[in-house]
Image: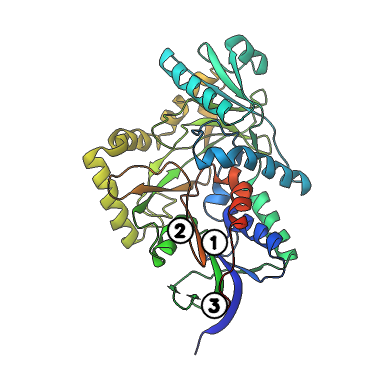
């Protein structure tokens, strides 16, 4: 039995938030073209995009010369606009970044200066002002208040995008994992079909590096996954805690630390962890492990541990401890001492951050990475704050697409 053959002008691999927004912008620029989204799962956003916190970041964590800084502020605006237009609930709760000692004040000041350079609306406030915003929250001398930080439901956003795209004529093919790519003939092979494309957009998330490798791109990187676990409150919502509370991050790594998140429905959770995984879809302790991935990831994690690259020994040890709920709870106690952290006991569905590292010197790739050929575009390392940035990234990248060759 032969493969079905089909053609599409633009084929997008991956139906996460980036694949969906890239499709939307592609349809806006090329309304007459056939846009096809291939997704290996049965529905959109079943991995990172549907499992992230839903926080819309303001854009003050990132150095001014980074792509993350370039897209975060605009992306925050565009995502809110989309949600407002589509009647999707937005929890415009804001965020406080608090500190616990003198050393952290220097990091706080650095974050504030980054935000000002990035054009972000921010306030550097004292303890009295923190208490006025929320009397439950504690800090040491100063804190950052971000009024434009907000929270939405990733599932609601992505499912709404799916419906909008279908109305615009975008075709979805689910259960369609890429088995092979013939770059010369511009053909994608899945289990069901051979698909000839004019232009390919790689938004494959955890597997974006594998798609890019067919084109000889991104070979200097390898993907190492990190698991993010959240704990939910066991019963009633502590309603007086009405905004997100974050610690100051370690600016040398891309993780933001365990924090309070007020979800779009008003419920509250703490997390996430950043636990190194054994496979790209290793959501449960031993589940989802694939031998080939396990061997590759173990090799590079082992090298990072041996050389202590990116302080991996300490990071891995500290993160593994967070499997213990009491340790996770203790990490946020100082932020709001009157909140009973022992009631954060519900283990919520985890997410996995597909973090690129450099093969040669084993360093975290901190910024977004985009690569292109004449007939393809690849979104590598499209990780946090990619959900916030998604509309801004897509507008920028689609504007660059040109069709130089016909079928």
Give SS at disc 1: loop
Q: Quadrant of residue 168?
A: bottom right
Q: CA distance from mark 1 to mark 3?
A: 17 Å
What residue sits 63% from the left and 60% below the top? 23
Judge whether 86 appears above or below 372 on screen.
above
* Labels 2, 3: front one: 3
Q: Position of residue 304 (x, y in %)?
A: 27, 43
What residue sits 48% from the left and 23% below the top? 110
Which badge, 2 or 1, is on the more N-terminal residue?
1
Q: Residue furthest left?
A: 306
Q: CA distance from mark 2 to mark 3?
A: 19 Å
> Label 2 belongs to which residue?
208
On residue 196, the disc is 3
On residue 14, the disc is 1
Q: Position of residue 291 (x, y in %)?
A: 32, 61
Give SS at disc 3: strand
Asked if the residue at tag 3 contacts the one at tag 1, i.e. Cβ–Cβ closer than 8 Å, the answer is no
Asked if the residue at tag 1 contacts the one at tag 2, i.e. Cβ–Cβ closer than 8 Å, the answer is yes
Given residues 68 and 326, the one toward you in this image is 68
């Amino acid at each position: 039995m032969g493969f079905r053959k089909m053609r599409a002008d633009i084929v997008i691999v991956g139906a996460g938030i980036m694949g969906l927004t890239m499709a939307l912008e592609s349809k806006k620029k090329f309304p007459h073209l056939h846009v096809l989204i291939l997704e290996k799962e049965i529905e959109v956003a079943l991995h990172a995009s549907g499992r992230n916190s839903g926080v819309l970041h303001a854009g003050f964590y990132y150095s001014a010369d980074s792509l993350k800084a370039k897209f975060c502020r605009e992306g925050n605006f565009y995502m809110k606009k989309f949600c407002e237009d589509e009647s999707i609930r937005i929890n415009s709760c804001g965020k406080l970044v608090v500190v616990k000692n003198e050393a952290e004040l220097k990091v706080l000041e650095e974050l504030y200066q980054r935000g000002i350079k990035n054009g972000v609306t921010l306030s550097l406030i004292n303890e009295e002002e923190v208490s006025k915003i929320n009397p439950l929250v504690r800090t040491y001398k100063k804190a950052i208040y971000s009024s434009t930080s907000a929270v939405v439901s990733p599932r609601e956003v992505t499912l709404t995008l799916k419906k909008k795209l279908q109305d615009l004529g975008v075709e979805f093919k689910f259960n369609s994992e890429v088995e092979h790519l013939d770059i010369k003939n511009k053909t994608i092979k899945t289990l069901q079909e051979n698909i000839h494309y004019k232009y390919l957009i790689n938004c494959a998330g955890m597997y974006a590096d594998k798609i890019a490798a067919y084109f000889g791109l991104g070979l200097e990187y390898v993907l190492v996954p990190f698991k993010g676990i959240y704990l939910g409150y066991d019963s009633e919502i502590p309603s007086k805690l009405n905004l997100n509370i974050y610690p100051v991050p370690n600016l040398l790594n891309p993780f933001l630390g365990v924090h309070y998140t007020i979800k779009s429905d008003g419920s509250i959770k703490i997390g996430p962890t950043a636990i190194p995984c054994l496979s790209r879809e290793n959501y449960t302790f031993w589940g989802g492990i694939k031998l080939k991935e396990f061997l590759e990831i173990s090799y590079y994690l082992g090298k990072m541990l041996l050389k202590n690259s990116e302080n991996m020994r300490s990071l891995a040890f500290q993160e593994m401890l967070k499997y213990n709920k009491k340790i996770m709870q203790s990490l946020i106690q100082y932020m709001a001492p009157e909140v009973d952290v022992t009631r954060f006991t519900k283990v919520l569905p985890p997410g996995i951050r597909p973090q690129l590292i450099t093969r040669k010197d084993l360093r975290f790739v901190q910024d977004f990475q985009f690569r292109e050929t004449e007939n393809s575009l690849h979104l590598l390392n499209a990780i946090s704050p990619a959900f916030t940035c998604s509309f801004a990234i897509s507008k920028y990248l689609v504007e660059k697409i040109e069709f130089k060759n016909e079928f």
